[in-house]
Image (cartoon, rainbow, N blue to C red):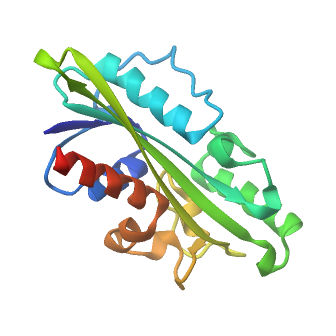
Amino acid sequence: MKILIATKNKGKFGEIKGGLGTDFEIGFLGDYQVDDSDFVEDGMTHEENARKKARYYFEKVGDGFDFVIGEDSGIYVDALKDELGVQTRRWGAGDAASDEEWLEYFMKEMKVRAPAFDQRGAKFVCCACVVGRVGAAGSGTLTRLFKGETLGLITDSVMAPILPGLPLSSVFLPEGFDKVYAALSREEKNKISHRGQAVGKVREWLLDL
């Protein structure tokens, strides 16, 4: 079974590929020259964005793949109510900023708005959308959505080296753990993270087909 992961973010790709395991042949969108200048990520929810990505890249580069996975995720922080979510990477310093610049801005805002540790509640949410071919000679398509969510806290300082494309992993402490996301092994993180949960559900569904 051949699957295209519709992201150019190497950090996200590595996590999704790791969560899917070794039972599939995995393709990385970043390896393809795709003119996606007309693609606009303007959904109001993670479900809308994940579905839009999966369907768009299924049409663009889906030939040769059985399924395309589009993923959208974000963080929701109690002290920054209604500011992050689907806008997470575009918030604050913006998506043109480096991981380090984005995280520096975020942490400065947290110091101002949530100086006490008990004000730093947060949750990560992920939605993964799978689009695939069905019917005679793959003439039709099917779409499935899978979600994951992890509760935790934002630390008051950076607790681990920044993972490329995943800056918040260095400051998000999942509930019940004494290490931030970025300090967990990939196996540990895939078991409990928002993305790991969603991709785990994708894997189970694909293996059951």
In the image, residue 134 above or below residue 72: above
Q: Is residue 200 left or right of residue 22?
A: right
Q: Residue furthest right?
A: 112
Please give the name of the residue rendered at 67% of the width and 52% of the height, measured from the top-left corner.
Answer: 101
Q: Is residue 51 left or right of residue 203?
A: right
Please give the name of the residue rendered at 72% of the width and 70% of the height, measured from the top-left corner.
Answer: 121
Question: In which quadrant will I find the C terminus?
Answer: top left
In the image, residue 6 above or below residue 179: above
Please give the name of the residue rendered at 33% of the width and 17% of the height, measured from the top-left corner.
Answer: 59
Question: In which quadrant will I find the N terminus?
Answer: top left
Which of these two is toward me, 139 or 38? Answer: 139
Q: Position of residue 154 (x, y in %)?
A: 68, 70
Numbered label tally? 0
Q: Position of residue 144 (x, y in %)?
A: 37, 37
In the image, residue 197 above or below residue 48: below
Which of these two is toward me, 36 or 164? Answer: 36
Please give the name of the residue rendered at 57% of the width and 22% of the height, measured from the top-left corner.
Answer: 40
Q: Position of residue 200 (x, y in %)?
A: 33, 58
Name the image quarter holding residue 46: top right
Q: Position of residue 24 (x, y in %)?
A: 15, 46
